[in-house]
Image: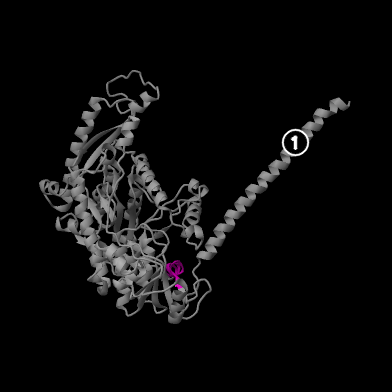
Amino acid sequence: MEHKARPGFIRRTLSGIWRALDRIRQASLNLIFLAVVAFLVAGWLASRPAPLPPDAALLIAPKGQLVEQRSVKSPMSLLQGGDGVHQVLLRDVVDAIRSAATDSRVKALVIETDGLSGTSLAKLEEIAAAIDVFRQTGKKVHAWGRHFDQAQYHLAAHADEVFLNPDGYVLLTGFARYPTYFKGLFDQAGVKMQVFRVGTYKSFVEPYTRSDMSPEDREATRLYLDAAWQAYQADIAAARPKAAAGLARYVADAPAQLAAAGGDAAAMARSAGLVDGLKTADEWRSHLVGLFGKGDEARGFKHVEMSTYVARLREEAPQRADKIGVVVAQGAIVDGEQPPGSVGGDSVAALIRQAREDDAVKAVVLRVDSPGGSATASEVIRRELELTRRAGKPVLVSMGSVAASGGYWISMAADEVWASPTTLTGSIGIFAMLPDLSGPFGKLGLAVDGVGTTPLAGGVDPRRPLDPQIASLLQQSIEHGYKRFLGVVAGARKMSPEAVDAVAQGRVWLGSQALERGLVDKLGGLDAVLKAAAARAAVADYEVSYIEKPLSPRDQLLVRLLSNDDESEAAQRRPSIAEQALARVRTELEGLALWNDPGHVYLHCLCEAP
């Protein structure tokens, strides 16, 4: 009897253990769910704008990259600790400064630049323009940094007074572009890249087909980098006249100047007039307390954070019947639906269509910050803008840091095309590139064989050498595509195809150079474009409405988790030089994964905004 009862006892024991484990599992899931809900509720409560203290300073202390639109990262980024790079909306910074200029509650502007990283000159110029408007009201701007790299100093230089930590430095280096060339690696692996292109200066394919920069790419790159460096120096000289005379020498003869300062980089910067004085962090806080009075313990002086101020602005903004709709096209142009941070042909077209069908939207502004990508997706977006114009709504393009190749193509359906003086644009050219992996397969002992109903069947299989007929088809398509590109630009810019070809061939231009060559209509930032759009639509009282796809609850959580604007050590951590180099190579290779054009044809610029 005892022997017969044992199986039942075991079953009951196992069943009890399973029920206990199941309860633990359910409890764990419930705890995770409650934690997420608590996080969202806490975030919502924290995001509610607090009352603004009177006569306070507005603190601008951006942490991370300045972007036109926040990217939604994958959940794996959270599990892996993220990439350490936070994102700050450029429009939040500009709106805060411009609004504070006429806000009686804001006494002055305080700029702290330590957290700023990875931004372009075009974006900095938009912030600088807003700061200049602020200063014209008679309000003061104060800036400080533990150190200043080139971008950080451009932001700080527009202040009335600039202070530097005594152990800090102002590092001005000029601009450079050094792509990674993968041909040697591909040769060792046996990978061949089959390239078809039109455009003498169309250099996108070169990192995969060469081991060095071509003479044509070197010529074009030097032209726009020299122009950008001249623009940078002109900006600093205009903002700080006391530094104008010695600015070029500060960079060109840095070792001798540092030696004259006894190796003290902070003293060297002060001697050159780049900063007004040296203050430690506690001395800086005491200085601000003396100017604005005591505030909270975290900062010590009476101020309002930019995020709080922007939230208050959004809450206080009156609702208006008429709107100027803004659609953001940031990132590589990719076929199909894509999340924010990438330009999906179908997803951006849907947003443009939404703006067109909204009677409250009187004009559409496309904010472009893209080096291009899929030719198919680019045309989908351009066509949707063309239909919007035909429907009677003005369409204007505002170019940000980069609006080149496919980014320029989508701009060709606008009534007006505006660029920043330092926007990278043009790159009117086209290419196709297909990998041939038959070499690596052979080295691994892998063979590919079979039959097809025609010579074209399986012709673009990367495991096999490219079929000559496919190569002929692609080359003809590329040549036709280039003629189409010239025709689209010629029609939009009222130029002959020959005149467009003379400034095309894949060549990249700064916005100021593009204006001289008839590729854009005017120079100016987004604020100027919005006013021009309102004028075309004949509306005086309007609100600016960003037309964006609503984020899912999951994506809202990811944005909050991965774009947290806290003061933690993790948020402040800068990647090492080695990490930056490895991340760059990884990013350059990962870009190949975005090539999903159905016809394998691309309008993409290998260019980096200075």
**Residue depicted at x 25% and y 42%:** 212
Q: What secondary structure is marked by label 1?
A: helix
Q: Position of residue 607 (x, y in %)?
A: 27, 49
**Residue depicted at x 27% and y 38%:** 601
> In the rendered image, is residue 19 in sight?
yes
State the residue in front, 75 or 124. Answer: 124
Badge 1 is on which residue? 15
Q: Residues within 10 Å of mark 1 (few under 14, many from 20)?
A: few
Q: Vertically, is 482 above or below 146?
A: above
Q: Position of residue 5 (x, y in %)?
A: 85, 28
The way the protein has been coloured in the rendering is: one colour
Main SS type for the magenta part? helix
On the image, which quarter does residue 231 sit in? bottom left
Is 306 contained in the magenta span? yes
Which amino acid is tagged 1? Ser
Q: Position of residue 195 (x, y in %)?
A: 25, 35
Q: Which residues are magenta?
A: 304-315
State the residue in front, 288 or 93. Answer: 288
Q: Position of residue 85 (x, y in %)?
A: 43, 55
